C-alpha cells in the first residue's frame, strides 16, 4: 500500500490505463476487462485489475490535472512496478481538421508548467510519447477505421482558461487539442524509464463550440480504450 493507493503488492499490473475520472475507470474495467476486481478506493480514486485477452491490465483513475496525475503515476511506477502507462481521456479540439469524436494520439505535450518544472530550472524539457506505443496506436486506429490525428497537444494547468492569446498561439503552431494531464505523465515516464502514451477522444471543440452529446460518449470513448489496449498488446 501507499499513501494514495490501497492495493496490495501484486494487485497492480505492469500495464496501466489512466482515465481522469474514477467512474470512467470503473466503466472501462467492466466493459473491456475479464474478471476485473477493484483494487483501490482510497479517496474515491477507483482502480481495477483484470485481464484483456489474457494480459493483466489495471485501469486506475488519475484525477483532474497534472498534480493529481503526478501522485498516482509516481506511486504506480515507483511502488507497484508499472511499466506502461496510457492516459485515456477527453480533450478539446483546437484545429479545423480535428472533429468531435476523433481520436488524438499525442506525440508531444506542451505546457506552461508541471509539478516537475522545478527540477529542470531554465531548461524547457520536451516531453514525448513512447514511439513503440504511438506506432501501435496509429496502426490500430487505421485498422479500425477510426478517425485519428497524431501530433502535439497542450496540457493546461487550468480548466477555465483566461489566456485567449495563448490559445491563439497554440492553434497557430498546429496544436491538435488541449487537456490537463499528459505532459506530466510523459515527463515521469522519461524520468523512470517506462513507456507512456496519451490516447484522447475529442469531446468538444474550442473553435466551433461543438460538444459530444452525453449519450454518444460511451461509444466514442470505447474506440479510445480499444486503441490503447491494442497499442499495449499488439500481438494479443
Image (cartoon, grey):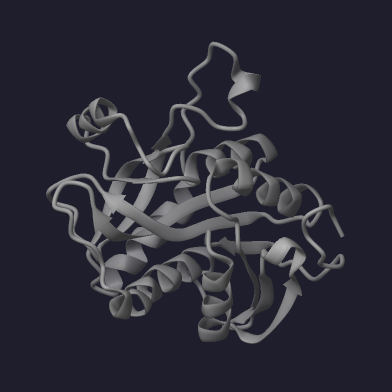
Percent of width and height locating residue 34: 62, 87
Q: Residue furthest top?
A: 122
Is 175 left or right of 46, judged from the image as shown? left
Between 13 and 140, which is closer to the camera in this rendering? 13
Q: Is residue 133 shown above or below 230? A: above
Is 189 left or right of 97, judged from the image as shown? right
Residue located at (53% from left, 15% from top): 123
Residue located at (29% from left, 75% from top): 144
Q: Is residue 221 shown above or below 14? A: below
Percent of width and height locating residue 195: 58, 49
Between 134 and 127, which is closer to the camera in this rendering? 127
Between 115 and 132, which is closer to the camera in this rendering? 115
Report the number of discs: 0
Residue located at (74% from left, 69% from top): 41
Percent of width and height locating residue 8: 86, 67
Between 86 and 130, which is closer to the camera in this rendering? 86
Percent of width and height locating residue 46: 66, 69
Quadrant (top left, top right, bottom left, bottom right) of the N terminus? bottom right
Amino acid at each position: 500500500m501507499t499513501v494514495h493507493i490501497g492495493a496490495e503488492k501484486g494487485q497492480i499490473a505492469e500495464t496501466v490505463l489512466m482515465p481522469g475520472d474514477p467512474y470512467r475507470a470503473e466503466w472501462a474495467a467492466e466493459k473491456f476487462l475479464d474478471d476485473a476486481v477493484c483494487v483501490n478506493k482510497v479517496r474515491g480514486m477507483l482502480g481495477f485489475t483484470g485481464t484483456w485477452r489474457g494480459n493483466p491490465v489495471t485501469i486506475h483513475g488519475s484525477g483532474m490535472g497534472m498534480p493529481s496525475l503526478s501522485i498516482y503515476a509516481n506511486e504506480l511506477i515507483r511502488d507497484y512496478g508499472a511499466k506502461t502507462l496510457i492516459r485515456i481521456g477527453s480533450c478539446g479540439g483546437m484545429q479545423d481538421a480535428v472533429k468531435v469524436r476523433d481520436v488524438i494520439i499525442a506525440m508531444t505535450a506542451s505546457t506552461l508548467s508541471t509539478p516537475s518544472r522545478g527540477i529542470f530550472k531554465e531548461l524547457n524539457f520536451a516531453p514525448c510519447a513512447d514511439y513503440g506505443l504511438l506506432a501501435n496506436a496509429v496502426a490500430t486506429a487505421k485498422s479500425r477505421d477510426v478517425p485519428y490525428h497524431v501530433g502535439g497537444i497542450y496540457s493546461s494547468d487550468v480548466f477555465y482558461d483566461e489566456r485567449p492569446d495563448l490559445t491563439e498561439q497554440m492553434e497557430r503552431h498546429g496544436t491538435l487539442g488541449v487537456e490537463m494531464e499528459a505532459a506530466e505523465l510523459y515527463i515521469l515516464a522519461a524520468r523512470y524509464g517506462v513507456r507512456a502514451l496519451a490516447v484522447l477522444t475529442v469531446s468538444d471543440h474550442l473553435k466551433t463550440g461543438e460538444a459530444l452529446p452525453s449519450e454518444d460518449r460511451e461509444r466514442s470513448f470505447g474506440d479510445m480504450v480499444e486503441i490503447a489496449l491494442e497499442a499495449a498488446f499488439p500481438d494479443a
